[in-house]
Amino acid sequence: MTAIQTNFPATFDLLKELTELSGISGHEEAIRARLIELLTPLTDDVRTDALGNVIALKRGTGGAGQPGGQKLMLAAHMDEIGLVVTKLDRGFLRFTSIGGINERVLPSQEVTVHGSVLSESKERRDLPGIVASRPPHVLPPASRKENIPSSELFVDVGLLPAELAETVSVGDVISIRRETIQLGKDKATGKAFDNRACLTALILALRQLQNVRHAWDIYAVATVQEEIGLRGAVTSTFGVAPDVGIALDVTFADQPGANGDETVAWDKGAAIGLGPNIHPKIHEKLVETAKSNEIPYLVEVVAGNSGTDAWAMQVTQAGIPTGLVSIPVRNMHTPGETIVLRDIERTARLLAAFAASLDGDTLENLRLE
């Protein structure tokens, strides 16, 4: 077997940069701006659509830019879960969640409050803060061992009520403040690996394709608002109208206490989805690509709604032959998501090899009898 080439330092550095940026669903400005910068030198055209999706086109050699030229769409969502201010309460901030955040891990989390009120210098301020609650000493005995509901939590940024009102208003978003760090020799932990890990793999794949001829046009799409309803996937897929779509997301990795039927092993490569949300021949071609290029992979059974952009891509317009490639992550939807860096690199290799394998016969071979 060919030795697997890894570049953990570069992979980790890119993952760290992307995960530490803010990009809560509907408020993806910071991550979107950086993705445009990263994708521009790797593709021929980069644009954003009305919803804020980033759509980067790398033209192929077979009918590139011509009517009828085949199009592959690789989509990974850029947004993350987070919080939003609902009330200014005597110098503290009350909040609710955007997306499926795990409320049990919120107490004592460091956060950044993205203030929208302009200061005297005409700049908006990001405020460091902490998610706090009443100390257990003043709680009723029956409540001291229970999880604290978010309605009883608040964010403290250390400002007096008048100062706070000059910087923050209802509707401002709050992101988790967490440094991405390396664990051991080949793992990393941090926030927003769902789905910045797949954006990392997508960028690495495009870098590999700089020296590879590919017939199909490749649309690398960073979608918005996946965490609150797959909205970016709906609009971007409709706009691109690809011949084939591959959704990239994370999936549940094995860990203590997890149901083995709902998780996959990590450090075994990308998980290739199989089920009604996935076109069977796209699944077969992904598996064939992994085998022929000696890329480790897993098969993940997805019995119904995958909960990913693939669910929206598959039924857009007249229907898109869609595949799903996922990277196993532990502790999903917490500030301590954990991943094997090697799995990101394996996913990138699979995407690049799959894109390069598409030719003039591919669409005919995808027909279902």
Image (spheres, grey):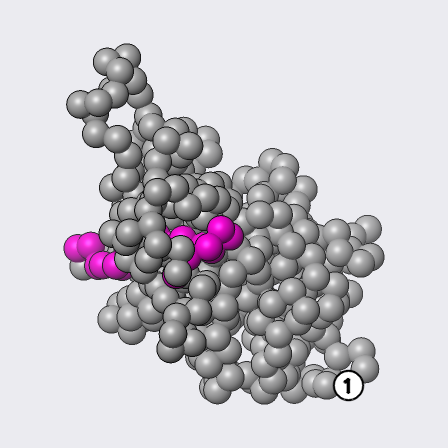
Q: Residue at x 46, y 81 (%)?
A: 37
- Residue 42 visible, this angle: no
Residue furthest toward the top? 142
Give the percent coordinates (x, y) of residue 248.
Answer: 52, 58
- Asked whether, in this view, residue 157 is left or right of residue 197, the answer is left
Reply yes or no: does residue 170 show up in magenta: yes
Reply yes or no: does residue 96 show up in magenta: no
Q: Is residue 9 above or below residue 303?
A: below
Q: In this view, does 158 lie above or below 365?
A: above
- Residue 113 visible, this angle: yes
Task: Decide: few, some or many residues near mark 1? Use Cα within 10 Å; few <14, some 14-19, many ≥20.
Answer: few
The segment highlighted magenta reads 167-184
Looking at the image, which is closer to me, 367 or 102? 102
Q: In this view, does 21 lie above or below 252?
A: below
Q: Which residue is drawn at 42% across and 76% down?
A: 122
Q: Is the magenta stretch mostly helix, strand or loop?
A: loop
For label 1, the residue is: 66
Q: Where on the picture, by quarter, is residue 237?
A: bottom right
Looking at the image, which is closer to me, 141 or 244? 141
Q: In what quadrant of the picture does the N terminus appear?
A: bottom left
Residue furthest toward the front? 162
Q: Residue at x 60, y 67 (%)?
A: 53
Q: What element carries label 1?
A: loop
Q: Residue at x 60, y 84 (%)?
A: 45
- Label 1 sits on what residue type? Gln
Give the percent coordinates (x, y) of residue 212.
Answer: 51, 83
- Asked whether, in this view, residue 236 is left or right of residue 99, the answer is right
